[in-house]
Amino acid sequence: LSLAHFNYCRYCLSVSFKSIDKMRFRLKPARETFTDADWVSHVKVERRETIGVTERQGVCDVRYVVQHVEVFKKPDSLDELSSEVLGSTMGGPNMEEGKEYLLCGSITEEGKLSCVGGQVCPEGGDPFLVEWNLLTEAFIQEMKSFDQ
């Protein structure tokens, strides 16, 4: 087995394990995803920029500039959420400029927002990309009742 074949096999296994992790995240109910998130917000994407390609072929980091239309959850230590959200083409939502989404994620030590992984979504919805216009008023009201 050559080193190139070994590295290729190692890469395939790492992608497979990441897919399994995404599948586990997919099974989380909306309330649990909301509770686990550092922040949850209804956002409008103003700009999307590719900021770098990693060593993994076809995977790149993405920076979104968003307007927070309504913030549902944020740490008490922050007055407001940053308008910059970091993501990835692997395991993160692929959002389009001008569209609105329900987005959640973590906050880095530097205060940057990250949105890699599953999102708060109604049962049966796409847990990786939640378009705001597809949410029902009933789900939005239910989400507002979730414990922070």
Image: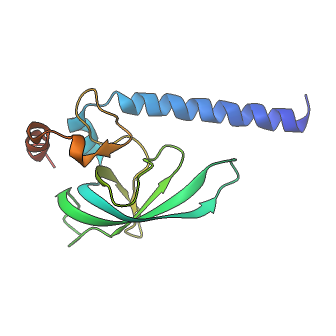
Work out which quarter of the rendered image holds the N terminus and state it: top right
Residue reaching furthest front?
98
Residue 95 locus on image (x, y percent) = 41, 52
Residue farthest to the bottom, as pictured: 79
Residue at the far right: name it: 2
The answer to whether residue 40 is left or right of residue 11 is: left
Q: Position of residue 126 (x, y in %)?
A: 34, 34
Judge left or right: residue 128 versus residue 79. right
Snapshot quadrant of residue 85: bottom left
Quarter of the rendering containing residue 110: bottom left
> What's the residue at 42%, 47% (across, down)?
93
How far from the left and from the top, in percent, is residue 92? 46, 47
Asked if 13 appears above or below 102 in the picture, the reply is above
Left or right of 94 on screen, residue 46: left
Residue shown at 61%/49% (left/top)?
A: 59
Q: Position of residue 88 (x, y in %)?
A: 51, 52
Residue at 22% over, 69% down: 77
Residue 105 vertical position relative to residue 84 in the rendered view, above or below: above
